[in-house]
Amino acid sequence: MVTASTAAAPVLEGASGARAAATPAAAVDPRKPVDIALNVNGRDHQLAFDVRTSLLDLLRERLGLTGAKKGCDHGQCGACTVLLDGRRVLACLTPAVAAQGREITTIESLANDGALHPMQQAFIDHDAFQCGYCTPGQILSAIACVSEGHANSDADIREYMSGNLCRCAAYPNIVDAVKQARSAMKAASTD
Ligand code: FES
Ligand code: FES
């Protein structure tokens, strides 16, 4: 009679045979730094770091770019939003190694020779912040929202900005700011 144990035996033997033939892989210490090249705000960096490092920690603690904020560190508030190849990502949930070979954009690079990005100017014009903690993430998310074509109505803006929380509840002002910047960004792209 074939039982569960006898039926399983050939499989187990095969597996152990294969294991015996293979050379055991050396244990990798995840704390051992790895060398990685990253492009941040147009500048190349060669860095050695623990592969478990989040992009947020790398930006803030290794590169001194503290514009991206650590709100929750759990992907729930959007305060850490940065752009990777123009697409918004949560830096607290993105391993820094995943940004290799891609263009990382943080709030620090938006102003051009002292001239604010239209989205930065619109946030000021519409008083779209109070404490400002969420603002760098809001601005980068808003730029991507416009680029994605998701800023065509108030409802769209609210929906596609819903991953960015504001404890100061500046939401109506943020919507107004996005609409102003949307027009300015469109005008700039057709110049
Ligand atoms: Fe990344 Fe809150 S800190 S989502
Ligand atoms: Fe204070 Fe948004 S301005 S959390």
Image: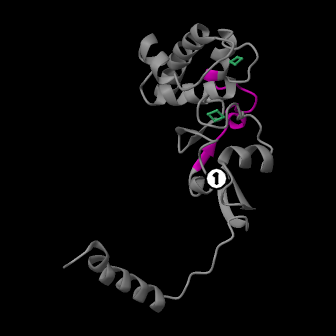
11 sits left or right of 139 in the view: left
Q: Amino acid at mark 1?
A: Ala
Q: Residue furthest bottom?
A: 21
Instruction: Tell me which segment is drawn in magenta.
Output: 103-119
Q: Is 37 situated left or right of 157 in this image?
A: right
Indicate if the residue with disc 1 has its beta carbon within 8 Å of ligand 1: no
Task: Indicate how the structure is coloured in the image.
Answer: one colour
Furthest residue toward left? 1
- Image point 69% across, 9% down: which residue? 127
In percent of width and height, residue 188 lies at: 53, 25
Q: Is residue 41 visible?
A: no
* Residue toward you, 171 or 111: 171
Q: How many marks?
A: 1
Mark 1, other Cα within 10 Å: few <14 / some 14–19 / many ≥20: many
What residue sits right under mark 1 in the picture? 96
Hey, which quadrant is residue 124 in on the image? top right
Q: Quadrant of ligand 2?
A: top right
| Image quadrant assignment for residue 167 | top right
Name the secondary structure under disc 1: helix
Does 81 sit above or below residue 127? below
| Residue 189 percent location from the top left of the image | 49, 28
What's the residue at 43%, 85% (across, down)?
Answer: 16
Instruction: Say which quadrant the N terminus sits in.
Output: bottom left
Q: Nearer the viewer, residue 170 or 76?
A: 76
Quarter of the view holding residue 117: top right
Magenta region includes residue 117: yes
Taking 35 as reference, is 97 left or right? Answer: left
Give the percent coordinates (x, y) of residue 103: 59, 48
- At 72% from the left edge and 49% from the top edge, which residue is drawn? 58
User: x and y percent of residue 139 in the render?
Assistant: 62, 25
- Residue at x 61%, y 57% (from the top left corner): 97
